[in-house]
Image: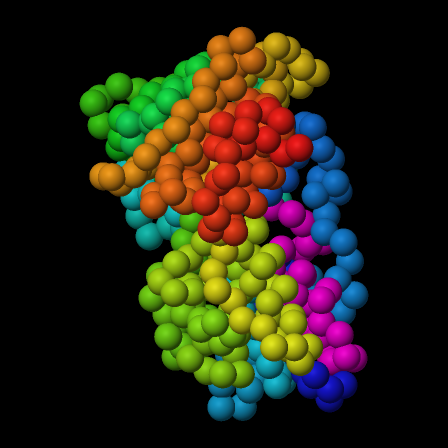
Amino acid sequence: MTSKQRVVVIGGGLAGVRLAARLTGGAAVTVLGEEPHVPYNRVLLAEVLAGRYAPEVAALPEAGPVLRRGVRAVRVDRADRTVHCDDGAALAYDTLVLATGSNPVLPPLRGLFEPGGRDLPDGVHAFRTMDDCLALSAAVRPGVRAVVIGGGLLGVSAARALAARGAQVVLAQQAARLMERQLDAEASALLHTHLEALGVEIHTECRVRGLTTASSPAAPQLPGRRVTGVELADGYRLEADLVVLACGVRPRTGLAQAAGLDVRKGIVVDDRLRTSDPRIHAVGDCAEHAGQVYGLAGAALEQADVLAALLNGADASYAGTRALTRLTLTTAGSPGPGPGTGTGPFDLACFGETTPRPGDDVVRFADATRRTYRTVVLRDDRLVGGVLLGELSTVGAVARTWEGDEAPLDLFHLLTDDGGH
């Protein structure tokens, strides 16, 4: 990359900032960040909401290039190779990178929006951005009634964080178990027990039908804008002062679609992370590679590193990410005896395919004394997925075996506490 090359990165999140920080050679790099905040690590938002971290702890290291905060790209002109912004600026590019991330999914709930309106009722929040996190932090207090809709990774993290702040939390999950995409039934049951011990009331196989609202004290002329409850499909009503929408995310592809790029679930990219326009690349939550949208921090970072290497002149390609998800749930100031009690830290890691196919082998180790649970799925003598819960001293060794697509030499040794030594 020469110093004359103009690189514009749309997106000031984890992927965009990582990419910009890795670019060398003196290229003119501009990062457009829609949010007014300094770039931050979205993974840490639950810890900020729980009160364990101050917001500034989530800040990402300085990327070095020019970062324009609070600026939104509104149009990409591929013929002129120009990005048009909402502040009237027009930025020319030689290489454009879309790192636009994803938006929270807002479910079609009755009462969520006024007819023709776009504003959520007071007390209803998504949980995706720093602004969402700060708004929830300002609203939560001991005894407040909070309903979290969605029992995936984000919903579980939000429920734990609100409980840590003293809220009375109800978690409504449509599926039969918590984190059903990542955990097997046994691990999900242990997570269920842990959250209940923290005071979280959990409803699974529970479909939310709508919200009930009343006049907002801040705007009494606009009736029906303060949430008062959540209605379930079976007619049951949950009282609520706060509602958190944790129903998943959807890649932000509007700019790419308007520019005529190939978009399916996400912005389609090849092994060099190029879109259907070779001058435009995509990385992170908005990108779809080989039919997969990852939506995980590990994949976003790996894609950013590969693209930086390519733009720096190296021979590199992206072959997909084998992502391992880790979650640590703790209570404030309570080390406690372990995950089974709910009073101590609950550490889990999950990777690959945790649900076996016909013909797969499943190996499980459970230690009631240490409150640990480990299960792995093997296919043709190779690890294809697993869940580790409790003490995670073996997670590094297990992950290396899985990522290397190797047959484990000593599975018992690998899954016991000294497996990494």
The quadrant in which the C terminus is found is top right
Q: Quick check: is 50 in the magenta stretch?
A: no
- Percent of width and height locating residue 16: 62, 63
Q: Is residue 9 left or right of residue 203?
A: right
Q: Is residue 159 above or below residue 323?
A: above
Q: Is residue 234 left or right of residue 313?
A: left
- Scheme of image coloration: rainbow
Q: Which residues are magenta?
A: 14-42
Image quarter of residue 398: top right
Residue drawn at x 52%, y 44% as measured from the top left: 401
Q: Is residue 379 left or right of residue 164?
A: left
Nearer the observer, 181 or 133: 181
Is residue 249 visible from the viewing direction of this image? yes
Residue drawn at x 54%, y 9% as measured from the top left: 369
Q: Quick check: is 22 in the magenta stretch?
A: yes
Q: Is residue 337 above or below residue 110?
A: above
- Percent of width and height locating residue 256: 44, 72
- Percent of width and height locating residue 324: 52, 43
Q: Is residue 326 left or right of residue 244?
A: right
Residue drawn at x 48%, y 48% as measured from the top left: 406
Nearer the observer, 321 or 28: 321
The number of numbered discs placed on residues in the rendered structure image is 0
Residue drawn at x 71%, y 72% as measured from the top left: 23
Is residue 231 visible from the viewing direction of this image? no
The quadrant in which the N terminus is found is bottom right
- Percent of width and height locating residue 70: 65, 61
Nearer the observer, 151 or 22: 22
Q: Residue furthest front?
A: 409
